[in-house]
């Protein structure tokens, strides 16, 4: 009997999870509290980061193919791309931390930092995809 009660409780929790997710998405259409604004900014950054992570292997593969076609004295496309990406991540994080100082220590600071990171990440994804040209 205890097992069935535990199972039913777990089932109720699992069935309510999609509804909770839908409620959170609906809140992001018009967030009213700072907590909701911060959470929505985090969701936007997660989506931007996911798009970047989807584009990255395509661009990296393209640059590896470029190197494969070049003579040894001209290779370096992949290394240049990797250095640019690593440097960009450092730039993004440092720049967005500086943006957060407009509300340093306040509840709005995470919103400013995370929104900045989402914006720059979307821009970087566009930049990376542009490297592919018509590919």
Image: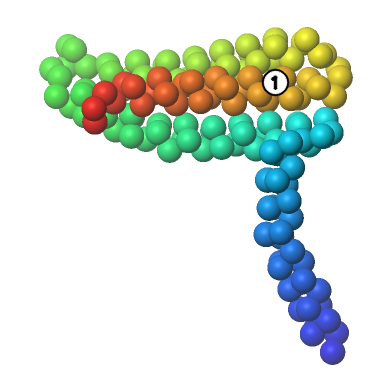
Q: Is residue 125 visible?
A: yes
> In this rendering, does residue 82 appear at all?
no
Residue 90 vs residue 52: left or right?
right
Above or below residue 72? Residue 51 is below
The answer to whether residue 43 is above or below residue 116 is: below
Please give the name of the residue rendered at 74% of the width and 55% of the height, measured from the top-left corner.
Answer: 20
Looking at the image, residue 100 sits to the left or right of residue 75; the answer is right
Circle 1: is it few (<14), some (14-19), or many (20+) Cα within 10 Å? many
Residue 126 vs 16, above or below: the answer is above
Q: Nearer the viewer, residue 45 or 79?
A: 45
Query: Viewer-proximal residue, 19 or 62?
Result: 19
Q: Residue at x 58, y 17 (%)?
A: 92
* Residue 73 in the image, given as x and y percentages of width and height: 17, 11
**In the picture provided, is 34 more to the left or to the right than 58?**
right
x 56%, y 37%: residue: 47
Dot 1 lies on which element?
Answer: helix
Q: Which residue is mark 1?
A: 113
Q: Which x, y percent locates residue 61?
A: 29, 33
Quadrant containing the N terminus is: bottom right
Identity of the residue furthest to the bottom in this view:
1
Residue 71 image point, x, y percent: 13, 17
Q: Residue furthest front?
A: 30
Horizontal and vertical percent position of residue 11 = 73, 73
Residue in view at x 76 percent, y 78 percent: 7
Q: Is residue 134 left or right of residue 55?
A: left
Colour theme: rainbow
């Amino acid at each position: 009997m205890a097992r069935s009660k535990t199972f039913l409780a777990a089932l109720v929790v699992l069935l309510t999870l999609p509804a909770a997710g839908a409620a959170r998405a609906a809140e992001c259409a018009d967030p009213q509290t700072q907590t909701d604004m911060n959470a929505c900014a985090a969701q936007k950054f997660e989506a931007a980061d996911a798009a970047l992570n989807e584009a990255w292997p395509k661009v990296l593969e393209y640059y590896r193919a470029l190197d494969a076609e070049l003579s040894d004295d001209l290779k370096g496309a992949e290394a240049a791309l990797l250095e640019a990406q690593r440097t960009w991540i450092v730039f993004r994080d440092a720049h967005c931390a500086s943006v957060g100082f407009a509300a340093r220590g306040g509840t709005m600071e995470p919103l400013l930092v995370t929104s900045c990171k989402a914006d720059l990440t979307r821009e970087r994804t566009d930049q990376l995809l542009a490297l592919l040209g018509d590919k």
